[in-house]
Image (tube, helix red, strand yellow):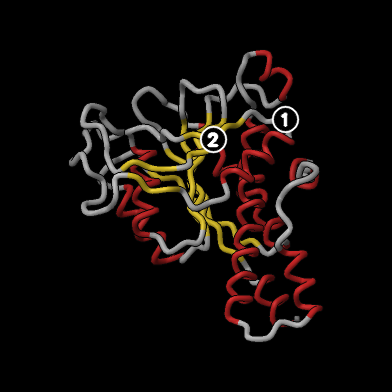
Amino acid sequence: MFAVAKLVAMRIRILVTGFGKFPGARRNPTALLIHELRKHRARLSRLGIALELDVLPVVYREVPIKLRRLEETLKPDALLHFGLAARSKLFKIETRALNRSSLLHCDASGRRAPHRVIVPGAPHIAKSTFPGRQIEAALRRAKLHGQLSIDAGDYVCNQSLMASLAQSKARAIGFIHVPRIAPSTRRNDALRKGRPSLRDLIQVALIAILITARKIRQDRAIDFAKGSTEVSFSTRKHYDFVMKPAEGPALDLAPFMA
């Protein structure tokens, strides 16, 4: 049982990325999110989560290169991308990426995608590997407006998800599109304007991080069980605890949001 507990308790490295500005969005809330998440690193570390943060440029030619460097340097267990969907009113949990980019839209450098196919030789559709359904359920319990999506667009957001799914060895990879946030950080004021607040955005990110970390611990327990020839009753009880689904009451984010 000690071996299982040690395996499951191993530190989980999660890379969370946002994006910088691009045509039509002089201010990107996901860049602000990355700045705010730095304040939660210490608390997440006490939960066994090593949080890595980066802001990606909205530049077709640079994103795959930067993601590859981050992968080689950090070797993350999970990759969570956040990007702006300016026309959306909901948090969109992307369940897949398409292996194609639009040749019509310019990026932050003023250039269009160099090729329509993002990853030559890869399938047309790549499914996200993070626990999207569990994240969506947790957002609903927290009274945050999120939904599963099958369309990550045809811009740099979709490119980053496709590139990560194709080249990263991380156990969990996903993307969450966020709407424009209201200027106020007070949730009630923001909701009156029909937009979420920065506080809401931070809560969404923390929920995604915590649910993803739990999923990775579950996967580690499964891997250990598959490789074990003998599993004692006490060890199985530990598996049962680890494998409980992320259902029930909303996650307690009060310590983070104080």
Please provide percent x and percent y for residue 47: 72, 61
| x 41%, y 35%: residue | 152
Q: Residue at x 59, y 65 (%)?
A: 219
Query: Helix, strand or loop at disc 1?
Result: loop
In terms of depth relative to the viewer, which is nearer, 13 or 249? 249
Which amino acid type is shown beneath numbered disc 1? Answer: Lys
Residue at 71%, 82% in the rendered image: 231
Give the SS element for disc 2. Answer: strand
Give the vertical position of 215 relative to 85 (above or below): below
x then y, percent, for residue 16: 52, 50
Question: First in sequence: mark 1 or mark 2?
Answer: 1
Tag nearer the camera, 1 or 2: 2
The amino acid beneath tag 2 is Leu
Disc number at residue 148? Answer: 2
* Residue 74 screen position, x and y as percent: 46, 65
Q: Split into 4 quadrants, where in the image is the N terminus? A: bottom right
Q: Would you identify the image quadrant in which residue 109 lies?
A: top left
Q: Residue at x 63, y 76 (%)?
A: 225
Front residue of 109 and 219: 219
Q: CA distance from mark 1 to mark 2?
A: 15 Å
**Left or right relative to 155: residue 177:** right
Please state if 198 lies on the left or on the right of 104 as rendered: right
Q: How many marks?
A: 2
Residue 167's quadrant in the figure?
Answer: bottom left
Residue furthest to the left: 114
On residue 40, which mark appears?
none
Q: Which quadrant of the rendered structure holds the C terminus? A: top right
Q: Few, some or many C-alpha atoms within 10 Å of disc 2 (few <14, some 14-19, many ≥20)?
A: some
Please rate how many residues cluster around mark 1, counting C-alpha atoms within 10 Å: few if below 14, some from 14 to 19, many from 20. Answer: few
The residue at which mark 1 appears reads as 143
The foreground one among 9 and 65 is 9
